[in-house]
Amino acid sequence: MKQPAIKISHSSLGTVATLALALLLGATAAAAPVWLDELDLSKTSQGWGEAHKNKSVDGHALTLGNVVFEHGLGTHAESVLYLNLQGGAEKFSATVGVDAEVNNDATSVEFSVIGDGKTLWQSGVMRAGTPAKALEVNLTGIKNLILMVGDAGDGINYDHADWANAKFEISGARPETVAAPHEDAVILTPPAPPTPRINGAAIFGVRPGHALLFMISATGVRPMTFSADHLPKGITLDAKTGLLVGALAQPGEYVVTLHARNQFGTDQRALKIVCGDQIALTPPMGWNSWNCFAGAVSAEKVKAAADALIKSGLQNHGWNYINIDDFWQTHRDSKDPTLQGPARDAAGRILPNPRFPDMKGLADYVHSKGLKIGLYSSPGPWTCGGCVGSFGHELEDAQQYAEWGFDYVKYDWCSYSPELEAKRGSATNLGVIKSWSAAAPKKLTEQMYPYAVMQAALAKADRDIVYSLCQYGMGDVWTWGAQVNGNCWRTTGDITDSWGSMAGIGFAQAGHEKFAGPGHWNDPDMLVVGKLGWGSLRPTRLTPNEQYTHISLWCLLASPLLIGCDMTQLDEFTLSLLSNDEVLAVNQDSLGKQAGRIAKNGDLEVWAKDMADGSKAIGLFNRGTTETGVEVKWTDLGLTGKHLVRDLWRQKDLGTFADAFKASVPRHGVVLIRVGK
Ligand code: GAL
C-alpha cells in the first residue's frame, strides 16, 4: 500500500532554522533565505513541457518518494537554468530527485550544480524510485551558477526532475535568473564558388516502370548547362535546368556521368541510378509544414515554400521535397469553414479541405520546379490534429495520392488502436494477414499491422512514394520499420526548439545505427532552425552553437532532413546552416551509414560515421555549459598513423595529425571534421 505522503512546509521552518543558527553563531547579520521559486523560472530551458514553480512538470504537487514539497522547481531533462548571483549568495541547498508522478524504467536523470564553470555538485544517475538526495553547496566567491539536469545518457523520456526545497542563503543582493549567455550568429559556411559544383545525392533509387524525377543540384553562376554521358534508355535530361525525367523498364545499376558548365568552368560527377525495389537510397531532404504552420497550412503557403526553396538557392544544395503535414484534409469538428466539407466522395476517395482546392494542380506546380511533394495521414479514422485519417480507406488513399502525383507519405498513429483493428472487416485489410504470414520473418505485431496495411496499399500504386512512419519509436520501430517497407521511421516524440529537446533526442540515437541503411532511415524528427513556432512564428530558441550541433548531428545520423521553418523568411545564418555542401555530403553519403557514439566523457561526446570514400566524418560535441577541449583518438576510429583533418563547416584543412585530434568546442557546440582520406 502506498504510504501517506508527508508534507514539508518550509516557509517558516527555514527562517526559524536560520535564525537559530545565527543566534548560535552570534552573528549579527544572518544570511536570509531566498527560495528558488521566488525567482523568474520562465528562463528555464528544458526538453519537454514547461518548467513549474512549486509543481512538477506535469503540474502535480512536487513529490519525491512519499514526501510532498511546497517549494521548488519541477522541470524535465535536459534542463538548464542560468543564474547571476550578484555577489550576494552564500549557499545553495535543495533536495533533488525524480518526481513520484513517473514510474518508468526509461527514467534516468543527473542533477548538476555548476559555479563559474566548475561542477560544484553532481547527483549521479537517479531513476524513478531512487531516494531523494539533499545537497548543500558553498557559493562564496561564485558569480554565475547553472542548475542543470542531464538525461544520464539515455534520452529524455519520462525524465521528470524536481529541485525541491531549493533555496539560497544570501547576505547581499538577491540572485537573478538570466537568459543563456548571448552568442553571435557567426556564419562559418564559405560562399559557393562561381564555378559549377555538383552537389547532393550521388546515388538514386527508382522502381522499374515508375516515373523518375531527379534534379541535378549544382551551385555556380547561371546560366549553366547540363549534360550526361551514358544516360540509360527511357531517361532524358533538360540541358537548361538539369532535370532528369523518364522511367526505366529494366532493373539494374546505371552509372551516368553528369556535367555542368557555365562561363567560369565545368564540373562533373558520377550518379548511380539503381533501378530495383529500393527508393530513398539517401535520406530525404526537404521541407515540411508542421513546425512553422501546424494547423494553419494552405496551398498558397505550400507553393510559397516551393518558390522560396528555389529562390533561396537551396535546391542547388540537394533540398527537394515539399511536404504538407496535417490539415490538408477536412476536420472532424472545427468551426473554421476552410476546414469543413465532405470527407470523401461517393467512391470513398478522400477530399481535401477548401484550403487545398486542387491537389493535382499543386503537385504539378511543385514538380514543374523540379521538386517533389509529400503529404500526411494517420492509420486511425482521425489524424493527430483531428482531420480525416485513412482507416478502412488505405487503398483508395494510396491510389488517390498516386493519381495526384504525390511522392512522400508521412503516416502517423493517432486514433488507431488494436481494438479498432479488431473491428476491421477482411475486405479492407488488403490481404495483409495472408501475404504477411507467407513471407514474414517475424510475427506481425499489433504495432506493425497498420503500417503493413498501408504498405500493401502503396505497393499497389503505380508510383514511387517514400513511406515515412511516424509512431514516435513505439515497439522499437527501428527493429521492424524496414520490414513494413518504411523508408524512414520516427524514433522519438515531437521535437521542439529547445536545447533539452534537440540534444535529448539527438544524442539518444546512440545504438540505433545498426538499423539504418540505404532505403531505411532512423528519423529523430524535423529541423528546428529558422522561423518556426507551430502556428505563431518566432525565431528558433536554439543558440547559434546549438544550431550547429543540431545540423551536424542530424547529418551524422543520416537522418531525413526536413526543414521546419517558414521558407519565405530565411535569414542569412539559417541559410548558411542549410547550404554547406561538405556538411550535407555527410548526410547524403552513398554508403548510407549512420554515425555511432565512439567516446563519451561526461558532457563530451565523439560521434563517427564511415563514408563511402573510406574517410570518417566525426563530430566533437560539448553538451556542457563551458567551452572545453574535445579529443578524438585515432585508435577509437580504428586508424593508425598520420591523417589529414578537414573542418567541414569552414571547409578548410586543419593539417595532418598523428594519433589524435583535439579541438576547443564551445558550450553546446560542435567541431565537425572529416579524417582519413
Ligand atoms: C504528430 C507528429 C507531428 C505532426 C503532428 C500533426 O503526431 O509527430 O510531427 O505530424 O502529429 O498533427
Image: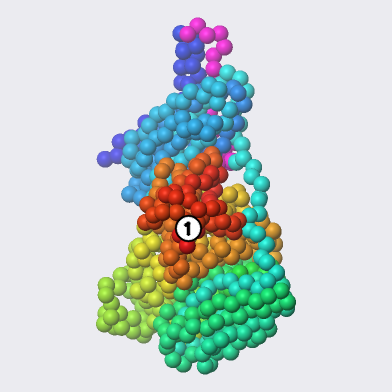
Magenta span: 25-44
Q: Position of residue 329 (x, y in %)?
A: 56, 74
Q: Position of residue 195 (x, y in %)?
A: 68, 71
Residue 35 falls inside the magenta stretch = yes
Q: Can you see residue 170?
A: yes
Q: Nearer the viewer, residue 211 or 204?
A: 204
Q: Can you see residue 304?
A: no
Taking 215 as reference, is 541 above or below it?
above
Q: Is residue 334 left or right of residue 313?
A: left
Q: Quadrant of the N terminus?
A: top left
Find out if the beta carbon at label 1 lies less than 8 Å from the nearest ligand 1 atom. Answer: no
Q: Position of residue 540 (x, y in %)?
A: 62, 54
Q: What residue lies at 60% left-to-right and 41% top-to-bottom? A: 180
Q: Which residue is mark 1?
A: 675
Numbered disc 1: secondary structure: strand
Q: Is residue 98 left or right of residue 364?
A: left
Q: Position of residue 153 (x, y in %)?
A: 40, 48
Q: What residue lies at 50% left-to-right and 11% top-to-bottom? A: 22
Give the crowd class for mark 1: few <14, some 14-19, many >=20 residues within 10 Å.
many
Residue 527 position by quadrant: bottom right
* Mark 1: amino acid: Val
Q: What residue lies at 46% left-to-right and 68% top-to-bottom? A: 613
